[in-house]
Image (spheres, grey):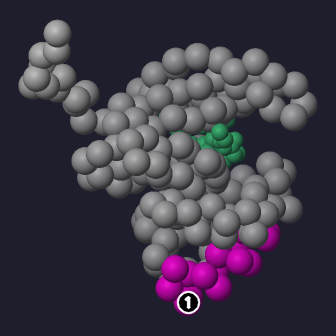
């Protein structure tokens, strides 16, 4: 089926009954795809953590077909991108970019969040291109991070301004 990217929007997953029903079939289909997206139980487990965000691209909030999704773990002061995924036939149509922009928008609205971190395989040039076009900062490498021994690159997006320590009482 041809994806009509011009009609797609991004939505925040809110665990409605129709969204939960769609999630199960979509994630199971993606898991069988070339990149072996997470198993459904792993997505549910991530979603059970407080603050975890799931953002998806579809033609309506209740759609049973998503073009892509981003899953983000949100801690007290920083967030970690767990995965961003676009269905193979929908790639290079800016869906990944729009999903990430929605992630940034959601995190920027949370005043306490200072940064988003993510790891990417050194061989994954498509994802690295996406992160660079979004002005993420390459901050380091994790050697042999993946099970096959491949290194990871670490990217960071910063939000808000750093804490103002000048207003703290001086010591000594
Ligand atoms: C990485 C991924 C999410 C990108 O999604 P996408 O919708 O195809 O990306 P976009 O169309 O928004 O492209 C964003 C930028 O990246 C570039 N890009 C995307 N795929 C590319 C590719 N295969 N080769 C070169 N550049 C690519 C685009 O040209 C675009 O740059 P531009 O704005 O300068 O034109 C998608 O390829 C994917 O799902 N891959 C499998 C899962 C994965 O690897 N996720 C990342 C795990 S860390």
Task: Look at the image and tell me whether residue 165 can be seen.
Answer: yes
In the rendered structure, the answer to whether residue 157 lies left or right of residue 80 reads: left
Q: Which residue is mark 1?
A: 17
Q: Nearer the viewer, residue 39 or 102?
A: 39
Residue 25 shown in magenta: yes
Vertical comparison of 127 with 1: above or below:
above
Farthest top residue? 172
In the rendered structure, the answer to whether residue 52 lies left or right of residue 158 reads: right
Vertical comparison of 54 with 65: above or below:
above
The percent coordinates of residue 99 (x first, y second) are 48, 52
Q: Quarter of the picture for ligand 1? A: top right
Q: Is mark 1 within 8 Å of ligand 1?
A: no
Residue at 47% over, 51% down: 74
Task: Look at the image and tell me whether residue 104 can be seen.
Answer: no
The magenta span reads 15-30
The percent coordinates of residue 79 (x first, y second) are 47, 44
Residue at 25% over, 27% down: 162
The percent coordinates of residue 14 (x first, y second) are 46, 76
Quadrant the C terminus occupies:
top left
Quadrant the N terminus occupies:
bottom right
Residue 148 shown in magenta: no
Circle 1 — which element? helix
The percent coordinates of residue 97 (x first, y second) are 47, 44
The quarter of the picture where residue 124 lies is: top right
In the rendered structure, the answer to whether residue 34 lies left or right of residue 140 reads: right
Mark 1 Cα within 10 Å, few/some/many (few <14, many 20+)?
few
Residue at 52% over, 80% down: 15
Vertical comparison of 151 with 34: above or below:
above
Residue at 68% over, 57% down: 87
């Amino acid at each position: 089926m041809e994806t009509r990217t011009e009609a797609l929007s991004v939505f925040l997953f809110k665990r409605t009954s129709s969204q939960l029903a769609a999630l199960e079939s979509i994630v199971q289909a993606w898991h069988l795809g070339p990149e072996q997206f997470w198993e459904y139980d792993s997505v549910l487990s991530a979603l059970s953590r407080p603050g975890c965000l799931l953002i998806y691209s579809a033609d309506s909030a209740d759609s049973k077909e998503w073009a892509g999704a981003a899953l983000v773990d949100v801690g007290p002061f920083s967030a970690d991108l767990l995965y961003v995924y676009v269905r193979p036939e929908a790639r290079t149509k800016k869906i990944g970019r729009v999903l990430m922009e929605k992630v940034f928008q959601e995190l920027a609205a949370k005043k306490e969040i200072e940064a988003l971190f993510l790891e990417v395989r050194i061989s994954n040039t498509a994802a690295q291109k996406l992160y660079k076009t979004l002005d993420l900062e390459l901050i380091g490498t994790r050697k042999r991070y993946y099970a096959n021994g491949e290194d990871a690159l670490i990217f960071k997006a910063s939000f808000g301004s750093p804490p103002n320590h000048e207003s703290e009482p001086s010591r000594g």
